[in-house]
Amino acid sequence: MRKNTLMKSSNDRALTGVCGGIAEYLGISSFVVRVLFIFLPVNLLVYIILSVILPEAPESLY
């Protein structure tokens, strides 16, 4: 069984794949995550930090 880990998305990315990765991890739409990032007070700082520290997801077959 594969452990669900937080990674940048390899197939659902607009810039770096952070929002797509969070959406895949939580099992929700990436649109919802992107809208939430727009309304977070420190959204740019959080996004930059996550884009640096999150590992890239391996390329998927689907």
Image (cartoon, rainbow, N blue to C red):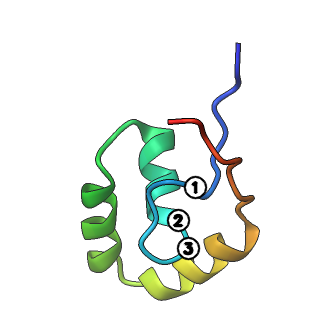
Give the residue displayed 33% in from the left and 59% down from the top.
Answer: 33
| Disc 2 + disc 3, Cβ < 8 Å | yes
Spatial separation of the CA atoms under disc 1 and disc 2: 7 Å
Q: Which residue is mark 2?
A: 17
**The one of 30 and 48 positioned closer to us in this rendering:** 30
Who's the residue at 26% across and 77% down the image? 39
Which is more N-terminal, label 1 or label 3? Answer: 1
Q: Quadrant of the N terminus?
A: top right
* Count of numbered labels shown in the rendering: 3
- Residue 26 is marked as none
SS at mark 1 in the image? loop
Residue 47 placement (x, y as % from top left): 53, 77
* Residue 46 to residue 55: above or below: below
Label 2, label 3: how far apart the Cα atoms are: 4 Å
Q: Is residue 42 left or right of residue 18?
A: left
Within-10-Å neighbours for mark 1: few <14, some 14–19, many 20+: some
Give how far apart the Cα atoms at labels 3 and 1 are: 9 Å
Query: Mark 1 — residue?
Result: 10
Labels 1 & 2 near each other (Cβ < 8 A): yes
Q: Amino acid at mark 2?
A: Gly
Look at label 1 and name its amino acid.
Answer: Ser
Q: Locate residue 55: give its quadrant.
A: bottom right
Q: Is residue 15 left or right of residue 38?
A: right
- 12 up-or-down from 3: above or below: below
Question: Taking 51 as reference, is 20 above or below it?
Answer: above
Identified by mark 3, the residue type is Thr
